[in-house]
Amino acid sequence: MNTAEASFRLLRFILRLLAHTPFRVLYALSDGMFYLLYYVVRYRRKVVRRNLTESFPDKTLHEIKHTEKAFYRFFTDMTLESCKLATISKEEIRRRMEFRNVEEVNSMLRRGRSVAVYLGHYGNWEWVSSMPLWLEQGTVGAQIYHKLRNEAMDRLMLHIRERMGAVSVDMHKTARYITTLAAEHKVCTIGFIADQSPRLKESRHFLHFLNHNTPVLTGTEKIIKHYGFEAFYLDVRRTRRGFYTAEFVKMHDEPRFLPDFELTALYFKHLEQAITRQPELYLWTHNRFKHATKLD
Protein backbone atom coordinates (compact mmCIF):
# COMPACT_ATOMS: atom_id res chain seq x y z
CA MET A 1 0.00 0.00 0.00
CA ASN A 2 1.47 3.37 -1.01
CA THR A 3 1.48 6.46 1.19
CA ALA A 4 -1.39 8.17 -0.65
CA GLU A 5 -3.66 5.15 -0.25
CA ALA A 6 -2.73 4.78 3.42
CA SER A 7 -3.53 8.46 4.00
CA PHE A 8 -6.87 8.06 2.26
CA ARG A 9 -7.85 5.06 4.38
CA LEU A 10 -6.87 6.82 7.61
CA LEU A 11 -8.83 9.95 6.72
CA ARG A 12 -11.80 7.84 5.65
CA PHE A 13 -11.76 6.01 9.00
CA ILE A 14 -11.71 9.31 10.92
CA LEU A 15 -14.45 10.74 8.72
CA ARG A 16 -16.69 7.71 9.21
CA LEU A 17 -16.11 7.79 12.95
CA LEU A 18 -17.19 11.43 13.13
CA ALA A 19 -20.01 10.91 10.64
CA HIS A 20 -21.60 8.21 12.83
CA THR A 21 -21.30 10.35 15.97
CA PRO A 22 -24.67 11.75 17.16
CA PHE A 23 -25.06 15.51 16.76
CA ARG A 24 -25.24 16.16 20.51
CA VAL A 25 -21.90 14.38 21.02
CA LEU A 26 -20.44 16.08 17.94
CA TYR A 27 -21.26 19.51 19.36
CA ALA A 28 -19.70 18.60 22.71
CA LEU A 29 -16.58 17.68 20.76
CA SER A 30 -16.86 20.98 18.88
CA ASP A 31 -16.91 22.91 22.16
CA GLY A 32 -13.62 21.27 23.12
CA MET A 33 -12.15 21.96 19.68
CA PHE A 34 -13.06 25.63 20.05
CA TYR A 35 -10.99 26.03 23.20
CA LEU A 36 -8.09 24.13 21.65
CA LEU A 37 -8.17 26.08 18.38
CA TYR A 38 -8.78 29.51 19.90
CA TYR A 39 -6.80 29.51 23.13
CA VAL A 40 -4.06 26.90 22.61
CA VAL A 41 -3.27 26.60 18.90
CA ARG A 42 -4.46 30.17 18.22
CA TYR A 43 -5.20 29.11 14.63
CA ARG A 44 -4.88 32.15 12.32
CA ARG A 45 -5.89 34.47 15.16
CA LYS A 46 -3.93 37.40 13.72
CA VAL A 47 -5.57 37.05 10.31
CA VAL A 48 -9.06 36.83 11.83
CA ARG A 49 -8.50 39.82 14.14
CA ARG A 50 -7.12 41.95 11.30
CA ASN A 51 -9.97 40.98 8.95
CA LEU A 52 -12.63 41.79 11.53
CA THR A 53 -11.04 45.04 12.70
CA GLU A 54 -10.58 46.36 9.17
CA SER A 55 -14.01 45.20 7.98
CA PHE A 56 -15.92 46.72 10.92
CA PRO A 57 -14.09 49.94 11.89
CA ASP A 58 -17.06 51.15 13.95
CA LYS A 59 -17.02 48.15 16.28
CA THR A 60 -15.27 48.37 19.64
CA LEU A 61 -12.52 45.94 20.59
CA HIS A 62 -14.99 44.20 22.91
CA GLU A 63 -17.43 43.72 20.01
CA ILE A 64 -14.65 42.48 17.72
CA LYS A 65 -13.55 39.90 20.30
CA HIS A 66 -17.15 38.76 20.78
CA THR A 67 -17.56 38.21 17.01
CA GLU A 68 -14.13 36.57 16.84
CA LYS A 69 -15.03 33.97 19.48
CA ALA A 70 -18.45 33.41 17.90
CA PHE A 71 -16.73 32.78 14.58
CA TYR A 72 -14.36 30.15 16.02
CA ARG A 73 -17.27 28.41 17.73
CA PHE A 74 -19.14 28.31 14.43
CA PHE A 75 -16.02 27.27 12.51
CA THR A 76 -15.55 24.13 14.64
CA ASP A 77 -19.29 23.39 14.44
CA MET A 78 -19.28 23.67 10.66
CA THR A 79 -16.17 21.52 10.28
CA LEU A 80 -17.75 18.65 12.20
CA GLU A 81 -21.18 19.19 10.62
CA SER A 82 -19.56 18.75 7.22
CA CYS A 83 -18.33 15.30 8.26
CA LYS A 84 -21.95 14.25 8.80
CA LEU A 85 -22.50 14.50 5.03
CA ALA A 86 -20.83 11.09 4.76
CA THR A 87 -23.76 9.34 6.47
CA ILE A 88 -26.66 11.74 6.99
CA SER A 89 -29.95 10.72 5.36
CA LYS A 90 -31.69 12.81 2.70
CA GLU A 91 -34.61 13.33 5.04
CA GLU A 92 -32.39 14.59 7.85
CA ILE A 93 -30.39 16.99 5.69
CA ARG A 94 -33.62 18.39 4.23
CA ARG A 95 -34.82 19.04 7.78
CA ARG A 96 -31.59 20.75 8.80
CA MET A 97 -30.85 22.64 5.54
CA GLU A 98 -34.12 24.10 4.31
CA PHE A 99 -34.13 25.74 0.88
CA ARG A 100 -36.74 28.44 0.31
CA ASN A 101 -38.27 30.10 -2.77
CA VAL A 102 -37.45 26.86 -4.59
CA GLU A 103 -40.55 27.05 -6.79
CA GLU A 104 -39.27 30.16 -8.58
CA VAL A 105 -36.11 28.28 -9.53
CA ASN A 106 -37.97 25.10 -10.47
CA SER A 107 -40.42 26.99 -12.66
CA MET A 108 -37.47 28.31 -14.67
CA LEU A 109 -35.96 24.86 -14.94
CA ARG A 110 -39.26 23.49 -16.23
CA ARG A 111 -39.21 26.20 -18.92
CA GLY A 112 -35.75 25.04 -19.99
CA ARG A 113 -33.86 27.91 -18.34
CA SER A 114 -30.60 27.00 -16.60
CA VAL A 115 -29.76 28.74 -13.33
CA ALA A 116 -26.52 30.01 -11.78
CA VAL A 117 -26.49 30.38 -8.00
CA TYR A 118 -24.03 32.73 -6.32
CA LEU A 119 -22.95 31.84 -2.78
CA GLY A 120 -20.02 32.61 -0.53
CA HIS A 121 -17.88 30.99 2.14
CA TYR A 122 -20.70 31.78 4.50
CA GLY A 123 -22.78 29.51 6.71
CA ASN A 124 -22.36 25.81 6.08
CA TRP A 125 -21.56 25.95 2.38
CA GLU A 126 -20.77 22.22 2.37
CA TRP A 127 -24.39 21.43 3.24
CA VAL A 128 -25.46 23.47 0.21
CA SER A 129 -24.47 20.37 -1.78
CA SER A 130 -27.90 19.03 -0.74
CA MET A 131 -29.54 21.55 -3.10
CA PRO A 132 -30.37 18.92 -5.79
CA LEU A 133 -32.81 17.31 -3.32
CA TRP A 134 -35.02 20.38 -3.76
CA LEU A 135 -34.67 20.89 -7.51
CA GLU A 136 -36.82 19.77 -10.43
CA GLN A 137 -36.24 16.10 -11.20
CA GLY A 138 -34.49 15.37 -14.47
CA THR A 139 -32.30 18.48 -14.28
CA VAL A 140 -28.61 18.62 -13.42
CA GLY A 141 -27.44 20.03 -10.08
CA ALA A 142 -23.73 20.91 -10.02
CA GLN A 143 -21.20 22.80 -7.95
CA ILE A 144 -17.88 24.31 -8.96
CA TYR A 145 -15.01 23.36 -6.67
CA HIS A 146 -11.30 23.99 -6.26
CA LYS A 147 -9.33 20.77 -6.28
CA LEU A 148 -7.46 20.21 -3.01
CA ARG A 149 -3.72 19.67 -3.01
CA ASN A 150 -4.02 16.67 -0.71
CA GLU A 151 -5.21 13.87 -2.98
CA ALA A 152 -6.65 11.76 -0.16
CA MET A 153 -8.65 14.67 1.25
CA ASP A 154 -9.80 15.63 -2.23
CA ARG A 155 -11.19 12.12 -2.84
CA LEU A 156 -13.05 12.18 0.47
CA MET A 157 -14.51 15.64 -0.08
CA LEU A 158 -15.71 14.72 -3.56
CA HIS A 159 -17.44 11.66 -2.11
CA ILE A 160 -19.36 13.55 0.57
CA ARG A 161 -20.16 16.51 -1.68
CA GLU A 162 -21.80 14.25 -4.26
CA ARG A 163 -23.84 12.03 -1.90
CA MET A 164 -26.97 14.16 -2.33
CA GLY A 165 -26.86 14.09 -6.12
CA ALA A 166 -24.67 17.10 -6.91
CA VAL A 167 -22.01 16.89 -9.61
CA SER A 168 -18.67 18.40 -8.57
CA VAL A 169 -16.93 20.23 -11.40
CA ASP A 170 -13.26 21.20 -11.26
CA MET A 171 -13.14 25.00 -11.58
CA HIS A 172 -10.61 24.71 -14.40
CA LYS A 173 -13.08 22.61 -16.41
CA THR A 174 -16.16 24.77 -15.83
CA ALA A 175 -16.51 26.17 -19.36
CA ARG A 176 -16.02 22.76 -20.96
CA TYR A 177 -18.59 21.16 -18.66
CA ILE A 178 -21.25 23.83 -19.28
CA THR A 179 -20.61 23.76 -23.03
CA THR A 180 -21.17 20.00 -22.99
CA LEU A 181 -24.45 20.40 -21.08
CA ALA A 182 -25.62 23.05 -23.53
CA ALA A 183 -24.74 20.86 -26.53
CA GLU A 184 -26.75 18.03 -24.98
CA HIS A 185 -29.68 20.41 -24.25
CA LYS A 186 -29.52 19.64 -20.53
CA VAL A 187 -30.99 22.12 -18.07
CA CYS A 188 -28.88 22.71 -14.97
CA THR A 189 -28.50 24.59 -11.71
CA ILE A 190 -24.88 25.36 -10.86
CA GLY A 191 -23.55 26.79 -7.60
CA PHE A 192 -20.60 29.19 -7.72
CA ILE A 193 -18.65 30.21 -4.61
CA ALA A 194 -17.31 33.44 -6.03
CA ASP A 195 -15.87 35.39 -3.10
CA GLN A 196 -12.26 34.18 -3.27
CA SER A 197 -9.40 36.58 -3.80
CA PRO A 198 -7.93 36.48 -7.31
CA ARG A 199 -4.20 36.12 -7.72
CA LEU A 200 -2.38 39.44 -7.84
CA LYS A 201 -1.64 39.25 -11.58
CA GLU A 202 -5.34 38.49 -12.21
CA SER A 203 -6.67 41.33 -10.01
CA ARG A 204 -8.24 43.53 -12.68
CA HIS A 205 -11.60 44.58 -11.22
CA PHE A 206 -12.09 46.05 -7.74
CA LEU A 207 -15.22 46.66 -5.65
CA HIS A 208 -15.95 48.18 -2.25
CA PHE A 209 -16.53 45.19 0.02
CA LEU A 210 -16.40 45.19 3.82
CA ASN A 211 -14.56 48.50 4.07
CA HIS A 212 -11.94 47.49 1.50
CA ASN A 213 -11.26 48.26 -2.13
CA THR A 214 -11.25 44.58 -3.00
CA PRO A 215 -10.17 42.64 -6.11
CA VAL A 216 -12.95 40.26 -7.18
CA LEU A 217 -13.47 37.33 -9.51
CA THR A 218 -15.78 38.02 -12.44
CA GLY A 219 -15.83 34.61 -14.13
CA THR A 220 -19.30 33.69 -12.85
CA GLU A 221 -20.80 36.82 -14.38
CA LYS A 222 -19.13 36.06 -17.71
CA ILE A 223 -20.55 32.51 -17.69
CA ILE A 224 -24.06 33.76 -16.86
CA LYS A 225 -24.01 36.25 -19.72
CA HIS A 226 -22.38 33.95 -22.26
CA TYR A 227 -24.74 31.01 -21.69
CA GLY A 228 -27.85 33.04 -20.85
CA PHE A 229 -28.29 31.65 -17.33
CA GLU A 230 -30.74 33.03 -14.82
CA ALA A 231 -28.94 34.52 -11.79
CA PHE A 232 -29.79 33.91 -8.14
CA TYR A 233 -28.08 34.62 -4.84
CA LEU A 234 -28.40 32.02 -2.08
CA ASP A 235 -29.14 33.85 1.17
CA VAL A 236 -28.09 31.51 3.99
CA ARG A 237 -29.07 31.99 7.62
CA ARG A 238 -28.26 29.91 10.69
CA THR A 239 -31.48 29.63 12.68
CA ARG A 240 -29.98 27.58 15.51
CA ARG A 241 -27.14 25.14 16.06
CA GLY A 242 -27.21 22.59 13.25
CA PHE A 243 -30.10 24.22 11.35
CA TYR A 244 -30.04 26.58 8.38
CA THR A 245 -32.30 28.18 5.81
CA ALA A 246 -31.14 29.00 2.28
CA GLU A 247 -33.36 31.30 0.23
CA PHE A 248 -33.02 31.71 -3.53
CA VAL A 249 -33.05 35.45 -4.27
CA LYS A 250 -33.41 36.48 -7.91
CA MET A 251 -30.73 39.03 -8.70
CA HIS A 252 -32.11 40.54 -11.91
CA ASP A 253 -34.76 39.81 -14.54
CA GLU A 254 -32.31 40.18 -17.43
CA PRO A 255 -28.76 39.61 -16.15
CA ARG A 256 -27.40 39.26 -19.69
CA PHE A 257 -28.13 42.91 -20.41
CA LEU A 258 -26.59 44.42 -17.29
CA PRO A 259 -23.47 46.57 -17.76
CA ASP A 260 -20.20 44.73 -17.23
CA PHE A 261 -19.41 43.95 -13.58
CA GLU A 262 -22.80 45.11 -12.27
CA LEU A 263 -23.96 41.55 -11.59
CA THR A 264 -20.75 40.92 -9.65
CA ALA A 265 -21.38 44.10 -7.66
CA LEU A 266 -24.92 42.90 -6.85
CA TYR A 267 -23.52 39.60 -5.60
CA PHE A 268 -21.05 41.27 -3.25
CA LYS A 269 -23.77 43.62 -2.01
CA HIS A 270 -25.93 40.63 -1.07
CA LEU A 271 -22.99 38.88 0.55
CA GLU A 272 -21.98 41.94 2.58
CA GLN A 273 -25.55 42.32 3.85
CA ALA A 274 -25.53 38.69 5.00
CA ILE A 275 -22.13 39.07 6.69
CA THR A 276 -23.25 42.23 8.48
CA ARG A 277 -26.35 40.37 9.71
CA GLN A 278 -24.47 37.33 11.10
CA PRO A 279 -20.73 38.11 10.86
CA GLU A 280 -19.65 34.96 12.70
CA LEU A 281 -20.81 32.83 9.75
CA TYR A 282 -18.16 34.15 7.32
CA LEU A 283 -14.79 32.45 6.75
CA TRP A 284 -12.59 35.02 8.50
CA THR A 285 -9.54 32.71 8.58
CA HIS A 286 -9.15 33.26 4.83
CA ASN A 287 -6.71 36.07 4.01
CA ARG A 288 -9.35 37.62 1.77
CA PHE A 289 -7.93 41.13 1.71
CA LYS A 290 -4.28 40.34 0.96
CA HIS A 291 -4.49 42.28 -2.32
CA ALA A 292 -7.06 44.83 -1.11
CA THR A 293 -6.66 48.28 0.42
CA LYS A 294 -8.54 49.52 3.47
CA LEU A 295 -10.94 52.38 2.75
CA ASP A 296 -10.31 54.35 5.95
Image (spheres, rainbow, N blue to C red):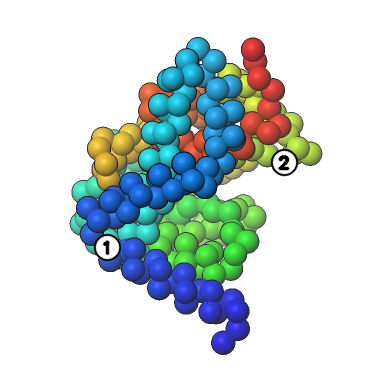
Within-10-Å neighbours for mark 1: few <14, some 14–19, many 20+: some
Q: Looking at the rendered structure, which numbered label has been put on residue 171?
A: none
Q: Quadrant of the C terminus?
A: top right
| Label whose residue precedes the other's in the sequence (2 or 1) | 1
In which image quadrant can residue 241 be found? top left
- Identify the residue shown where x is 53% and y is 79%: 6
Q: Is residue 212 left or right of residue 240?
A: right
Q: Position of residue 43 (x, y in %)?
A: 53, 44
Q: Looking at the rendered structure, which numbered label has been put on residue 199?
A: 2
Q: Position of residue 193 (x, y in %)?
A: 51, 43
**Marker count (numbered):** 2
Q: Looking at the rendered structure, which numbered label has been put on residue 21?
A: 1
Q: Position of residue 15 (x, y in %)?
A: 39, 66
Residue closer to the observer: 30 or 152: 30
- Identify the residue shown where x is 44% and y is 20%: 62
Q: Position of residue 79 (x, y in %)?
A: 41, 51
Q: Quadrant of the N terminus?
A: bottom right
Q: Is residue 260 above or below residue 200?
A: above
Q: Of helix, strand and loop, which one carries label 1?
A: loop
Q: Of helix, strand and loop, which one carries label 2?
A: loop
Outermost residue toward the front in this view:
40
